[in-house]
Amino acid sequence: MDYVSGLRCRECGTDFDQAPVHVCDECFGALEVQYDFERISQVLTRDLIESRPRNLWRYRELLPNGGEPQIGLYSGWTPLVRAERLAQHWGVDEVYLKDDSANHPSFSYKDRVVPVAIAKAVEFGMDTVACASTGNLANSVAAHAARAGLTCYIFIPEGLEQGKVIGSTIFAPNAVTVRGNYDAVDRLCSEIADRYPWAFVNINLRPYYIQGAKTFGYEIAEQLGWRFPDHVVVPTAGGTLLPTVARAFAELAQVGLVGGDLPRIHCAQAAGASPIIQALHSDADVIKPVKPDTIAKSIAIGDPGDGYDVLATLQASGGWGESATDVEIVNAIQLLARTEGIFTEPAGGATLAATGKLIDQGRIAPNESIVVSITGNGYKTVDAVAASLPGPHVIDANLADFNNLQQDLHSRQDR
Ligand SMILES: *Cc1c(COP(=O)(O)O)cnc(C)c1O
Ligand SMILES: [Zn+2]
């Protein structure tokens, strides 16, 4: 069953049939999937959704795919963790972590967008999938392509963490490192996508890919008992996730599944790749591209494709944004691990640090509910924190040695 009526240009409103295309041939505006929300609201109920398996396809009426899903059957439905100790640290009442560091199979939010895009590529009869990636997207495309038996090309910038590189090459894709940063990779891939009949999940399949990110928002509302939080803080690179989460909440309201005020959406960036925060803080109409320089490589995009959408969403929802330096990011990764037992990558650290700043500024009040988006996993980026952690204590294999150590540790605790 699908409820998609076609694609529509966001700029000039021209309608298009479904195809692997992402820009309007009249005006180069971005194409967007159109749904028949009237019909969806007649069939889609909380009970129906709750009766389905705990994966992203439980919201299938609001996704662009036809037929029975064959891909991504274990993706999505990640934990929404109530964070009491972190809340106490910040002096606020109600904090939740939407934990996509536990997403299947490649441990980031990209395991939501990739199944939707690849399922669509298969519907279109395409047998080669590809992407331009800062690391996590390549991991997810390579993993899903392996499972679906599709040919795969991934394109990444030089200088990525070993965990991110091997997290792709283990799945045996055609892996290409492009000399330069992500913005160069992205430019090259747009040219390749024009020449080769491949499904670039975040280029020609982009209208469908974006749709998968809505499930991050749907799940937050369902996991809160079909209500909206007051605030959601979202890390931003190219700007796919943040506006799409806002869209997801608006759709839930539109089809009558959730009532009440829509959440305020806040943006988090790494200070070394923060063109959107810079525009926001200087009240500028223009987002000036920057040259990324940060340990948060998964969100190191200097020229965000959907940056204006992010700014518009912040403004419309009443949200704000903050950036975090590399030192603040590392401290926040450790804070989350120490208080909640979750190991996130630098993107999650940036989001956590930004949330702390928004609370300190009074933009988030102590009695308001907050969801912090944890979008990636720290086990892929151990280099980011290695230098700031003490090593384990080393002893010989005898009890006397351990007794001495234990007394030492104990007396240090007392002090
Ligand atoms: C891709 C990614 C994001 C967000 O990127 P957008 O392009 O803004 O959607 C955030 N965190 C992690 C870990 C990512 O991999
Ligand atoms: Zn157009």
Image (cartoon, rainbow, N blue to C red):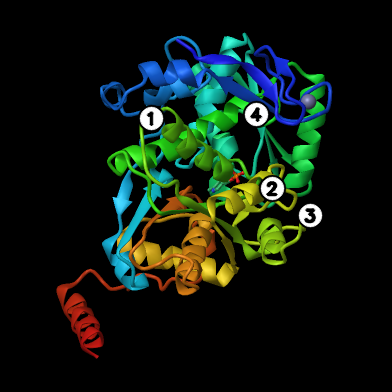
Q: Secondary structure at mark 1?
A: loop
Q: State whether label 4 is within 8 Å of ligand 1.
A: no
Earlier residue among tags 4 and 2: 4
Residue 284 figure quarter: bottom right
Residue 49 located left or right of residue 34: left
Pointer 3 residue: 286
Q: Looking at numbered disc 4 in the image, what kind of residue is underneath it? A: Arg
Tell me the crowding category of disc 2: few under 14, some 14 to 19, or many 20 or more residues within 10 angstroms, Cα based. Answer: many
Total marks shown come to 4
Pointer 2 residue: 307
Q: Looking at numbered disc 3 in the image, what kind of residue is underneath it? A: Val
Residue 237 located left or right of residue 44: right
Pointer 4 residue: 206
Q: Residue 398's mark?
A: none
Above or below, comparing residue 54 to residue 313 in the picture: above
Tell me the crowding category of disc 3: few under 14, some 14 to 19, or many 20 or more residues within 10 angstroms, Cα based. Answer: few
Image coords of residue 371 (percent x, y)? 40, 53
User: Mark 1 against mark 3, which lies toward the viewer?
Assistant: 1
Earlier residue among tags 2 and 1: 1
Q: Looking at numbered disc 2 in the image, what kind of residue is underneath it? A: Gly
Q: Is residue 111 visible?
A: no
Asked whether the beta carbons under mark 4 and mark 3 sit within 8 Å of each other, the answer is no
Q: CA distance from mark 4 to mark 1?
A: 27 Å
Q: Nearer the viewer, residue 136 or 236?
A: 236
Above or below, comparing residue 204 to residue 86 in the picture: above
Give the residue at x 62% y 11%.
124
